[in-house]
Amino acid sequence: MPVIINELVVSVSVSADNNASASSSEVNSTQKEEILKECVERVIEILNLKNER
């Protein structure tokens, strides 16, 4: 019997050092974007694998 997912909840917690300088916060922003992109890619990959079944 196949499993049907009606709702998918993804929560991510990213914390940054509040004492960081401006250039460091730019790097953190870039890192956050990369993490988010990777998460989205993995979720899409998992959904595609489930749809192939």
Image (cartoon, grey):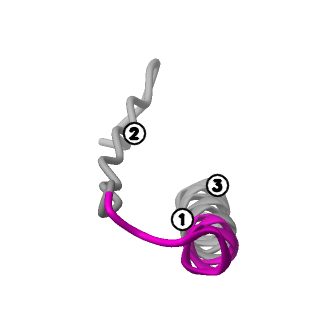
Looking at this view, is 6 or 16 the one in front?
16
Within 10 angstroms of label 3, few (less than 14), some, or many (20 or more) residues? few
- Residue drawn at (30%, 55%) of the image: 15
Residue 7 higher or lower than 33, as above or below? above
SS label for mark 1: helix
Residue 3 in magenta?
no
Mark 2 or 3 closer to N-term?
2
Looking at this view, is 43 or 4 the one in front?
43
Circles 1 and 2, Cβ within 8 Å, touching? The answer is: yes
Q: Is residue 51 left or right of residue 1?
A: right
- Residue drawn at (52%, 65%) of the image: 46
When asked about the image quadrant of residue 4, the answer is top left
Mark 1 or 2 closer to N-term?
2
Circle on res. 51: 3
Magenta residue span: 19-32
Could you say where residue 6 lies in the image, as x and y percent from the top left?
46, 19
**Residue assigned mark 2:** 10
Within 10 angstroms of label 1, few (less than 14), some, or many (20 or more) residues? some
**Residue assigned mark 1:** 39
Quarter that holds the N terminus: top left
Circles 3 and 1, Cβ within 8 Å, touching? The answer is: no
What type of secondary structure mainly makes up the magenta span?
helix
Could you say where residue 35 lies in the image, as x and y percent from the top left?
54, 72
In this view, the mark in front (2 or 3): 2
Q: Disc 1 versus disc 2: distance between alpha carbons? A: 9 Å
When asked about the image quadrant of residue 2, the answer is top left
